[in-house]
Image (tube, rainbow, N blue to C red):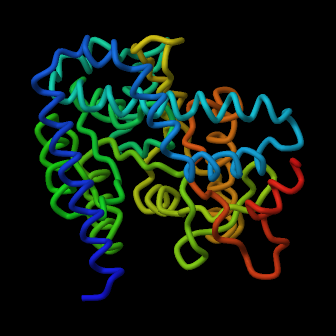
Amino acid sequence: MTFKDTKKNIERTLVRWTYYFFTWLFKVLPYGAFKAMNGVLLAIAYFILRRMRRSAMHTLQIAFGKEKPQAELERICKACFDNAGRGAIEIGAFTARPHLIKEKFSFEGNSRENLEAALKEGKGVIGISAHFGNFPLMLLFLAQSGYATNAIIRPSRDEIIERDFQASRSRLGLKTVHSYPRETCVLQSLKALRDKELLVVLLDQNTGSKSGVFVDFFGQKAGTATGPIIFAMRTGAPLLPIFTLRQGNSDHHQILIEKPFHLEQKATDEETIQYNVQKLTTIIEGYIRRYPTEWGWMHRRWKSQPKNASSVPTEQQVRANVV
């Protein structure tokens, strides 16, 4: 075993035992205790995660560098980490006390009606969302609210932790469709739609050219998965934008669901895919622009780039321009 393998095993073991410790802690301590410790825990995490902070600021500079001053980007970055940290605490506390999921989440306006209108078409529903707000609890809320909900999820690198995650999701009614192996993902996704269920896809992660297309996202080309469009072409299922938004500084969240819509057909399948992936990406960008602190800016969204395209600025180039 190489030094690199040994280091990786040690890191994975530490992560695993940290996870076990906090899982136990969430069960034995009252939720109020975590709420009281929120500020201290978030300040410590923000200080420790310097590398992730640099990555988030890099992404923010690419997206908003020409629109917002540096101080505003730093404020968004800090609020983004605070929101993510509070969300992680809520996930641990709420999954240990499932009644809190339905107490702290609710449908906004006509959101429930929009979801039910889509389901009434009888072809299943493809929910389009992002790593936005407390999306894991949003998925559990939909399942807890009586809707047969499936989510395409990228499995954790630690197989033992992933089995625990999946058992927790299953216990709370959410069906997991792992994003790979790809053929299995496709078959399970199509089955969910043919069973007239809700399939939620998070469409805001970097995807290489082999399994996606490049569309505009904050003025830069971003590799984006085509799965939702392929599923809609195969089944005729409607597309349904679904997002969750924290209410102010509280631990209450609202589910925002837009009206369902269908693919816009173009001259060729390739044009149909390209056009509709861009349409969905534009919807996601719109939510991020309206609520920038709710999105996970740590992700390297523009990591993949088309051949012969002008490259996205590196972190060093962005920092040089700021200075």
Q: Is residue 80 left or right of residue 318?
A: left
Q: Is residue 280 left or right of residue 227?
A: right
Q: Place residue 189 in its image quadrant.
A: bottom left
Q: Is residue 208 shown above or below 65?
A: below
Q: Is residue 304 left or right of residue 50?
A: right
Q: Is residue 167 left or right of residue 73?
A: left
Which residue does the image show at 62% across and 41% down from the upper left? 284
Quadrant of the snapshot with the N terminus:
bottom left
Number of numbered discs overlaid on the protein picture: 0
Which residue does the image show at 56% across and 47% down from the upper left? 50
Q: Residue furthest bottom?
A: 1
Q: Position of residue 66 (x, y in %)?
A: 89, 43
Q: Is residue 148 shown above or below 185?
A: above
Q: Is residue 245 visible in the rendered structure shown here?
A: yes
Q: Position of residue 265 (x, y in %)?
A: 65, 57
Q: Is residue 190 visible in the rendered structure shown here?
A: no
Which residue does the image show at 17% across and 23% down from the upper left? 98
Which residue does the image show at 36% across and 30% down from the upper left? 138
Q: Position of residue 183 (x, y in %)?
A: 32, 74
